[in-house]
Image (spheres, coloured by chain):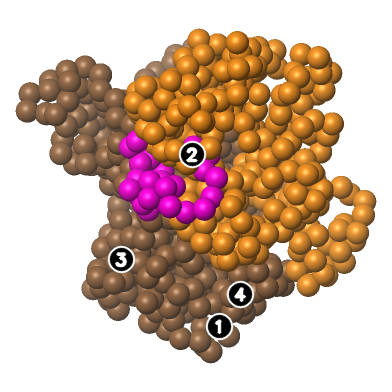
Amino acid sequence: MERILFGDNQFFGVNHMSEERARAQAMKFQKLEAIIEVLDAAYGEGIRAFMCTTHERIAEVCEHVRAHPERYTGFVFYPCMPYAHKYANAVTEQGLLGALKSFLPEQGALGAVLQGGMSVARKDADALARMLIDAEMKMFHGLQTPVVFMQNVLTDLLLGAGMVDSFRVFADHVAARYGAEPGFITMNVPMLLDALQRCGVDNPIVCANINKIGFRMCGGKEVYEKTIAERRFRPVAMSVFASGAIGAREAIEYVCRQDKIEAVVFGASSRGNIRATRMLIEEFWPPRARTDAAAAAS
Amino acid sequence: MIRAALIGLGKMGLSHLSIVNAHPDVELAAVCDTSDYVLDVVSKYAGLKTFNDYRRMLSTETFDAVFVATPSRFHAEIVKLALDADLHVFCEKPFCLDAAESLRLAEIAEREQLVNQVGYHYRFVGVFHELKQLIDRKVLGRLHHIRVEAYGPVVLRPKGGTWRTKKNEGGGCLWDYACHGIDLANYLVGAPRSVGGAVTNRLFSQDVEDEVYASFYYDGGLTGQVAANWSDESYRKMSVKISVWGENGKAVADRQEMQIYIRDNKGLPFEQGWNTRYTTDLTAPVWYYLRGEEYSAQIDAFVQAIKASRTDTRSTFRSAAETSMVVSAIARGASGDRVAVDPGRIEVYRPEPRQGLWQAIRQFGSAGSR
């Protein structure tokens, strides 16, 4: 897994601190060129992994990278699925079944099953899940996706509901069909690790908020620190700045001091900020963990 | 351990399923829905006991509490049955579509000392709760205006056919969207005495309104406005914003942050002029996070109230009934008279209170048992 992952919240008006800032970002990145410019800046800084939601606009980014393979040697995508608002809004508008239908190919066995009013669960809910994963993965065809993440709202929904076997279904399918390692984004790390252990997903990649103020770290900062130090999993830190509540230096130092963290994901809107963050990570990360990005950039 | 049942497995029901099931003090003993395929999935993958008839579920199993997340038109009947069975009840918003029915149920719950809560989760958003403290402590001085806005991308095309698009089932922007803002305004400053200038417009929907505007008139000269539009594609998700103006300053709050302008900071823990407070400082941690701390916090508040035998939750049946009354007043007002503007002689129009909301609340209150 790459050590520094570039995130995409800033491109879609996601900002956990300020709706004004979120809107300003949505305006700034309205055109694909603006997104590409920042991605190119990240690439120029040696960052090789783009961790992105399956937002419809990511399809345009994928198209661009496919069209210019020479400019993106070694560039990989870490898709995070599903983009939840797409589904939530569709369920509100069309109901659960209507929404499912709208996201799946019209032809095929599933349409017949749904239209016949037969029980999806008895027939094969696993098959339905696999079809939804494939639908989300379509935009990445021809690109490298070495890690595929389940988005936190889905991970945590299934986790809370106790539907833990679905994690196994996800893990098996992304491995078998896409040759990818499964990853899980969550706000509830200790609880998720128990569940993944129960369903036999060993040494999982788990991406979660890990930050110095304990923001959205369910169970608390101390529990997280202990979990990271002692349990068998591969932590990826996100929201390390807690949406700007922590100074950059302090934030990166906190994360890098925890040896077992394997990667950091962050978003930024300018080359200056990308570089500053990359340099901080390189400064604080222990030598053995020093990122490949440094080598690639020099 | 609190033995609980959940009725309704739609969008909110699934969210509650997850949060309730993850609560260490609750045993989710059964769930109920009319859709067999949803029940099959829940039974097979979550291992939960399922029913497709809530009457049968409530008569064959014993519970301490029930969570109701069905389409709104079923709320009254189910909540009544649950209260009659002596259960604590958490009901999804907007509670009952009939304000009088809402008040009757509030009175039953209060009389029987049953914990009663409605899922107006914005009351549990850290920033809005902080704004409430600020208003109660008179930091902004005497308030003279409150504005609440709710926008989001729900109905963006002239199609779709769930209960949310049906007028008689609690669909529409007024009952589904504006009610959040109205409830939040009620939480912050109390219910208005009357409603005026109500406007409801259709943009895409056939049967219901897609945007709502209205003015509120409160005791003591405070006025307010609500603006809600669920067909605003420029928003990524539902966004609620509150602005309040007082004699000592103003505050503007959304889910993420609050900006406060203070004229005179004597004795106050604020700077003169602008102050900003962020959600990261104002949000209490939750034991389990699904989609915003407020969704977990409201469930935990309900559970803790049951454990402590306290019925004064932050969002009671009674407060939800008041919200339903304001919603009803807007619906009635929107079809009321308008004042023509004569181009020859435009005069200043002073609105008279039209809907006797407070009177209605008093009336319903005195009609009850107490």
Instruction: Please name the residue that numbered disc 4 is placed on.
Output: B47
**A88 left or right of A287 in image:** right
Q: Secondary structure at mark 3?
A: helix
In front: label 2 or label 3: 2
Label 2 residue SS:
loop
From the image, state whether disc 3 or disc 4 is nearer to you.
4
Q: CA distance from mark 3 to mark 1?
A: 25 Å
Mark 1 or mark 3, which is nearer the start of the sequence?
A: 1
Query: Label 3: which residue?
Result: B304
Residue A42 locus on image (x, y percent): 61, 17
Q: Quadrant of the N terminus of chain A?
A: top right
Q: Nearer the viewer, mark 2 or mark 4?
A: 2
Q: Which mark is residue A41?
A: none
Q: Give the colour in which the image draws chain A.
A: orange
Nearest-to-viewer mark from 4 and 1: 4
Mark 1 surroundings: few (<14), some (14-19) or many (≥20) residues within 10 A: some
Badge 2: residue crowd in 10 Å (few <14, some 14–19, many ≥20): many
Residue under numbered circle 2: A261
Judge from the rendering whether residue B80 lies leftward or rightward of residue B103; answer left or right: right
Residue type at mark 1 is Met
